[in-house]
Amino acid sequence: MSVAVLLLAAGASTRMRGGDKLLELLGGEPLLRRSARTALASGAAETLVVFGANHPARRAVLSGLPIRAIYNKDWEKGMGASIAAGAAATPPETRAVIVMPADMPDLTPALLNHLIDALPSDGSGVILRPRTAQGKPGNPVLFGADYLPALAALDADRGARDIIDHHRAALTYLDLDTEAVLVDLDTPEAWASYRDGRRAGNNI
């Protein structure tokens, strides 16, 4: 049985005020391609990228990568519909899925593997979520196979939060010494601040 990554890349980037956050460049590489490479370099058996808004341009930047492309025709309904499209497309032998937003530049294969390695052999009913040393929960989140039907039934803009809220007893937090699980880039201001920080650290 395998673990799959659902890389969410369907939103319209409305907070970018005309730009597409997933096509913004970091070190000369579009953020979406960077995120896909992160997922592919982890121990997950498959990376499913859920597309929607700006589909042709986003699909093009992943040229040559061995991802499985899923088009969510209902992407305008919000993140829940995109998670549902990805969950419905997972193979029947899937052991768990990692729901990974595509706008989180500091996620690493090692971080994803931390989730995968923490999945017990009988972990179909578990939910694993990372949190910072300060106790702040973040993303991505791993869901055992028992939650695939519920994930495939989502259609609202709350993502999978209701599933997490309704199964608190199954939720395990993994404490990590990193802020990467909180960093997403949704606005021009967030991008500018992030780039300034990378320049200050000579990481451009």
Image (cartoon, rainbow, N blue to C red):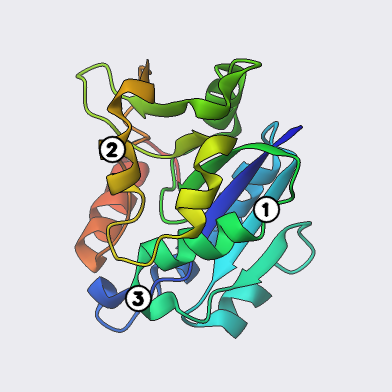
Q: Secondary structure at mark 1?
A: loop
Dividing the image into 4 quarters, which one contains the N terminus? top right
Image spot of residue 188 (x, y percent): 25, 67
Real-space CA distance between mark 3 and mark 1, rounded to the nearest whole angstrom: 21 Å
Q: Residue at label 3? A: 77
Foreground: disc 2 or disc 3? 2
Residue situated in front as seen by the camera: 1 or 39: 1
Real-space CA distance between mark 2 and mark 1, rounded to the nearest whole angstrom: 23 Å
Q: Residue at label 2? A: 166
At x 60%, y 45%, the residue is 5
- Quadrant of residue 30 in the image? bottom right
Q: Is residue 48 visible?
A: yes
Residue 142 vertical placement versus 26 (above, below): above
Are the residues tagged 2 and 3 within 8 Å (C-beta)?
Answer: no
- Quadrant of residue 163 in the image? top left
Are the residues tagged 3 and 1 within 8 Å (C-beta)?
Answer: no
Image spot of residue 129 (x, y percent): 39, 29
Foreground: disc 2 or disc 1? 2
Amino acid residing under circle 3: Lys
At x 29%, y 23%, the residue is 132
Real-space CA distance between mark 2 and mark 3, rounded to the nearest whole angstrom: 22 Å
Amino acid residing under circle 1: Thr
Is residue 104 shown left or right of residue 49?
left
Amino acid residing under circle 2: His
- Quadrant of residue 41 in the image? top right
Answer with mark 2 or mark 1, whichever residue precedes in sequence.
1
At x 34%, y 70%, the residue is 78
Q: Dot 2, how many residues are within 10 Å of its Cα: few (below 14), some (14-19), or many (20+)? A: few
Is residue 141 shown left or right of residue 96?
left
Q: Residue at label 1? A: 90
Q: Secondary structure at mark 3?
A: helix
